[in-house]
Amino acid sequence: MLVGLLLFGALLFALGLYGALAQRNAVRVLLAVELMLLAGGLNVVALTRFLPAGAENRRLGPLPLAGDYAAALGQTTTLFFLAVAAAEVAIGLAAVIAAYRLRPTPNVDEMDERE
């Protein structure tokens, strides 16, 4: 189950990376970056959810955040990821709208050209 979730997260991240590098539309690039952020959140939740309850570290001894506490920490971290993603969408769309006003095209390549 863990390997499947991690592979799914890696697949989503790879899909987002491909979309961010291959797309020319600025809105699609932003959507691809969002997909990468959400894939990272999925991987954090998957990794922390499947820590064993009696996990120990050789140097530190018993881990204080094992089992259910680690799952709650992973879910809380993912909520912060979502908050950052929401802020990134707001700032990214503001930047795209400002660039669109200067040069009325959604194409990233044409926005970069100088007159």
Image (cartoon, rainbow, N blue to C red):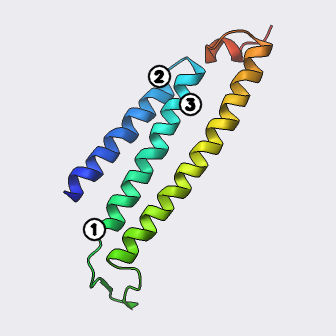
Give me the disc on residue 115: none
Could you tell me the amino acid type at mark 3?
Leu
Which of the marked residues, 2 or 3, is nearer the chain's N terminus?
A: 2
100 shown above or below 70: above
Quarter of the image where one finds residue 109:
top right
Provide the secondary structure element on which disc 3 rests. Answer: helix
Which residue is tagged 2? 22
Q: Position of residue 26 (x, y in %)?
A: 60, 22
Q: Report how far apart the C-alphas of labels 3 and 1 lie in the structure.
A: 31 Å
Could you tell me the amino acid type at mark 1?
Phe
Q: Quadrant of the N terminus?
A: bottom left
97 shown above or below 64: above
Q: Position of residue 12 (x, y in %)?
A: 36, 39
Q: Report how far apart the C-alphas of labels 2 and 1 lie in the structure.
A: 34 Å
**Residue at left offset 35%, top offset 79%:** 66
Q: Is residue 59 left or right of residue 77?
A: left
**Residue at left offset 62%, top offset 36%:** 89
Quarter of the image where one finds residue 111:
top right
Q: Position of residue 58 (x, y in %)?
A: 33, 88
Which of the marked residues, 3 or 1, is nearer the chain's N terminus?
A: 3
111 shown above or below 87: above
**Residue at left offset 41%, top offset 86%:** 64
**Residue at left offset 56%, top offset 17%:** 25
Residue with the most extreme left position = 1
User: In front of the other: label 2 or label 3?
Assistant: 3
Which residue is tagged 3? 30
Give me the disc on residue 50: 1
Could you tell me the amino acid type at mark 2?
Ala
Q: Is residue 73 left or right of residue 81?
A: left
